[in-house]
Image (cartoon, rainbow, N blue to C red):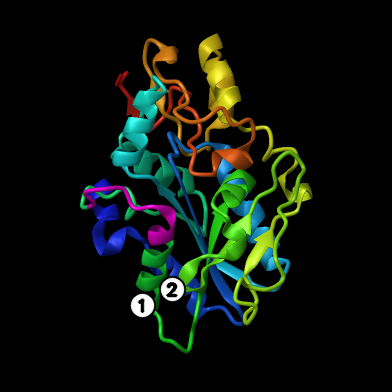
Amino acid sequence: SNMAAWVDGGWPLDGMISRANCSDGRLAVLVTTGALNPIHAGHLNAMTAAKATLEGMGIQVVAGYISPSHDAYVGPKCAAMGTTAFTARDRVEFVRQACEGSDWLHAGAWESSPQHRSWPDYPLVVKCLQDCIAAKLPPSRPIEVYYVCGLDHYEKCCLSRGLRNGAGVVVLPRDGKTASVPTTGSSGSSKARIIAVHPDLCSGALQQYSATKVREALREGNVDKVASYLPQQSDPVVEDKQDAFEPAFEEEASAAAAIDNDGGGEGSGGGDSRVTVLGRV
């Protein structure tokens, strides 16, 4: 159930811990945030590209968390843009379903939990995950946490300086452009763990998903095209007017931008869906 997702800090850690206990060498966990309104296949592909990049460097990724943003952030932004937002409960459930077929991806529910009076920004989300992992594993078995984001977000938030509390950053490319990453931290005393994903890992399947394309498909009433953008396990059904559910975030035309604290697009899927969204406007 969704309430179960908020238990134990909102981070399902059991699978991560068991994988860490069976692994040797340098270990890492990925986390990304965003409206995820709802999650689409581009978000999953981006996490897979980030995982492949780290593992190509000899860092084993034992888990990845996809964390929908709080209603206090998503709701007003969607309202200002004249678009509709799924509730946090729905967005977490869509992510949970999308991750069901994965042996390493999980939904993170802490960020969107109703326990927060105001929305927690991404540095706080990363710190919370770090603390939850540290509380579950001995200091002798450290796990590095990496924040996955798009190039626009990386540049806007000046993440070349890195994140506090020792978290790393994995930056997705945008339109074939790789992020410029420093070789040392801002203090010059320690190497900043900022890693750029190569565009080759984000060509084809990753780039074809975007909020703009989902919006266009919805306006055309093209149910099959919308369904093709959604993760196979997450297939929201929109009854009656598809145009009641337009993408909730900026008109980003790549999945790299869509993962960047911006959501995907809503759509309708096949009739065998396990999730039905009944025309909430």
Residue 32 included in the magenta stretch of the image = no
User: To which quarter of the image does residue 171 belong?
Assistant: bottom right
* Disc 2, SS: helix
| Residue occupying image coordinates x 36% and y 29% | 85
Indicate the position of residue 270 as horizontal and vertical percent values.
Answer: 48, 23
Indicate the position of residue 3 as horizontal and vertical percent values.
Answer: 23, 50
User: Pointers 1 and 2 in contact (CB under 8 A)?
Assistant: yes
Upstream in the sequence, badge 1 or badge 2? Answer: 2
Identity of the amino acid at label 2? Answer: Ile
Residues drawn in magenta? 116-125
| Residue 204 or residue 99, whichever sits in front | 204
Q: Which residue in the protein does label 2 denote?
A: 17
Magenta segment, principal secondary structure?
loop
Q: Quadrant of the C terminus?
A: top left
The mark closer to the camera, 1 or 2, is: 1
User: To which quarter of the image does residue 186 belong?
Assistant: bottom right
| Residue occupying image coordinates x 56% and y 27% | 251
Q: Which residue in the protein does label 1 denote?
A: 136
Residue 124 included in the magenta stretch of the image = yes
Is 212 rendered above or below residue 41? above
